[in-house]
Image: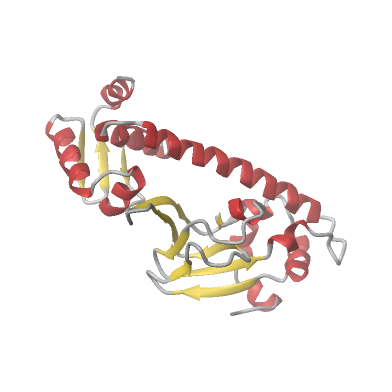
Amino acid sequence: MIGGYILYKKWLQVIIKSPLFHGIEEEQLNIILQCIKPRIVKYNKDEFIALAGDDFKEIGLVLSGEAMIVKENAVGNRVIISIVKPGELFGEMAAFSGKSKWPSSVIAQKSCTVLFISPKAIVSQCEKLCVSHQHLIMNMLNIISNKALILNRKVEYLSIRSIRGKIIHYLLEQYKNRGKNTFTLPLNRNELADFLNVPRPSLSREMCRMRDEGLIDFHRSSIKIKNVKNLKTLAEL
């Protein structure tokens, strides 16, 4: 565990760009960090940051690397909820739910560093009367609202019955986010299968069919949508 202003300073540019601290000037950020007293922990690749069912105490903010939020169903099948990158949070949905356990597991997808913050420190009255503390609370409410919308998107994927439909909607979403028809997927094939909640072999077979039909081309994690208009038409079927 690492603490103190000098070591917070190393991560200030990542922290200040986080939605949680959006709009807060660096001078005020320094004061808030001293007030809420977060701790910093480093994790190796594939190490558990949190395990579903463990006691929940703090919200995590990824400072470096990536973390993967996963959920297992009753028969042990894993579903990827999301990938958390530097500046992004995890655990915020559970923080104010009244639950005392982690609802999902969090795994270091790459070696990563995480800043942990007590939820009480965010919403409690500030000991130093920081002028930006109210801003911090409003940012937290905005983050929770946006996360609810993201989870709604996940439900939309689960509601699509065909594997092809799931793939098409996912690829079109990546196309929309990147603004170009050639891009690298943020998930490898196994992770994508978990995210879309489909068997890994079935995912690969369907992607190969789509390639043979001239809809897409791919090499490893690199994808090219060969005809965006056709893909959009298929998405509407």
Q: How many marks?
A: 0
Q: Where's residue 228, x and y in %?
A: 30, 27
Above or below — where is 95 with respect to 156?
A: below
Give left or right: position of 80 versus 9: left
Pick the front one: 142 or 12: 142
Give left or right: position of 138 versus 218: right
Above or below — where is 4 with respect to 220?
A: below
Above or below — where is 17 with respect to 159?
A: below
In what quadrant of the picture does the C terminus appear?
top left
Pick the front one: 152 or 208: 152
Q: Residue at x 33, y 47 (%)?
A: 185
Q: Residue at x 58, y 67 (%)?
A: 55
Q: Residue at x 53, y 62 (%)?
A: 62
Q: Residue furthest front?
A: 74
Q: Where's residue 80, x and y in %?
A: 39, 51
Q: Where's residue 211, x and y in %?
A: 16, 36
In what quadrant of the picture does the N terminus appear?
bottom right
Rendering quarter of residue 170: top left
Residue 180 visible here = no
Q: How is the image coloured?
A: secondary structure
Give left or right: position of 182 versus 95: left
Residue 2 visible here = yes
Q: Where's residue 135, x and y in %?
A: 77, 50
Rendering quarter of residue 67: bottom left
